[in-house]
Amino acid sequence: MSDIQLKDVLKFEHSFCVLPFIHQHIDTKQRQRVCCHSTTEITPERLIGIQQDMLANLPVPECSTCTKCEQQKQFSFRQTETRDWFRNYPKLCQDAIKNPVVISYDLRYSNNCNLRCQMCDAESSSEWARYIGKEVFQTWDPDSITINPDAKKIYFAGGEPFMIKSFSQVLNRIENTDCEIQVNTNATILTEHLLSALERFRDVTFILSIDGTGSTIEKIRTLCDWNIIQKNIDTLRHRLSPKFMVNTVLQKDNLDNIPELANWIDSKEISIWHAEILTRPEQFYFKNYASKLQWPESLWENACVQKNMQVYKNLKFIESSLAA
């Protein structure tokens, strides 16, 4: 397949994804995976095999999370990432199909984190590791990989990026200040070393991990304070003038709060909302919701719902599933 046609590969259950051709994901144990949604470590040899299978539209076991999602007629990470990359960089992506090149990075140098979110684990949170008595910190050397000077996007996660000093060290070595920098943060803590490192870049996006407002987020993201989160978001806005998007994990404990969350997102004039349905741990899956779902009709009128088809589809899927 020399040319990728979006209308074909974005169909449900097609196996092609652009990420194996342009993206490098390295987790807190320095393992390479296809992306953050895959749980399987891959070798350079296996990556080549994945690329070949995708071009032939053959099943890719490492991508089972997206496959299962699409089997339920929900938009997957594969679809949204492929769509966005091809729309923003059409020629670059087409060229990468023939000659793969890393221009996108998902770097997770450490699990250093101050929260104990109920859907997280010790691998991604040092606070969880401390709580259950496991090895607390998992950290690797940022000098162990070379970042392409022509990189288009670098995504930092963890752990909590504002607690991981190696992120600022990496940013200080990047000369291309037009590179898009994305920081996935719980917004509960700000540190000067990362704020200062980000000031050089023209395109900074904070992906805010917000699963609800008030007591809802404080229950789901244990040890957080909703008032501090809101204050820190205002500080980021005034200091860096960044873009914001909200990332929400849809689960049984935040369904009642979704209308209030949508109102809050609109009040902050945040146009991009990403909301995925939690699949594990299973006890928090939305079908374990014990009450009768009562979302008002006004929910569907919120701008953040209308503008983000993935959110709209997933919320409608939950609503219809619980009504069945």
Image (cartoon, rainbow, N blue to C red):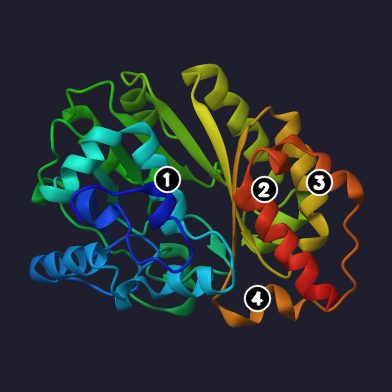
Task: Say which quadrant the N terminus sits in.
Answer: bottom left
The kind of secondary structure element at disc 2 is: loop
Mark 3 or 2, closer to the camera:
3
> Going by the image, does 86 lie left or right of 77?
left
- Which residue is under mark 2? 225
Where, by quadrant of the figure, is residue 303 drawn? Answer: top right
- Which residue is under mark 1? 83
Pick whichever, 125 or 13, lies toward us. Answer: 13
Mark 4 or 1, closer to the camera:
1
Task: Say which quadrant the C terminus sits in.
Answer: bottom right
Q: Residue at x 13, y 31 (%)?
A: 149
- Which residue is under mark 3? 300
- Which residue is under mark 4? 285
> Going by the image, does 3 lie left or right of 263?
left
> Going by the image, does 54 lie left or right of 298?
left
Q: Amino acid at mark 2?
A: Asp
The kind of secondary structure element at disc 1 is: helix
- Tag 1 and tag 2, C-beta contact below 8 Å: no
Q: Earlier in the sequence, mark 1 or mark 2?
A: 1
Q: Residue at x 9, y 51 (%)?
A: 144
Mark 1 surroundings within 10 Å by alpha-carbon count, few (fewer than 14), some (14 through 19), many (20 or more): some
Q: Amino acid at mark 4?
A: Tyr
Q: Earlier in the sequence, mark 1 or mark 3?
A: 1
Mark 2 or 4, closer to the camera:
4
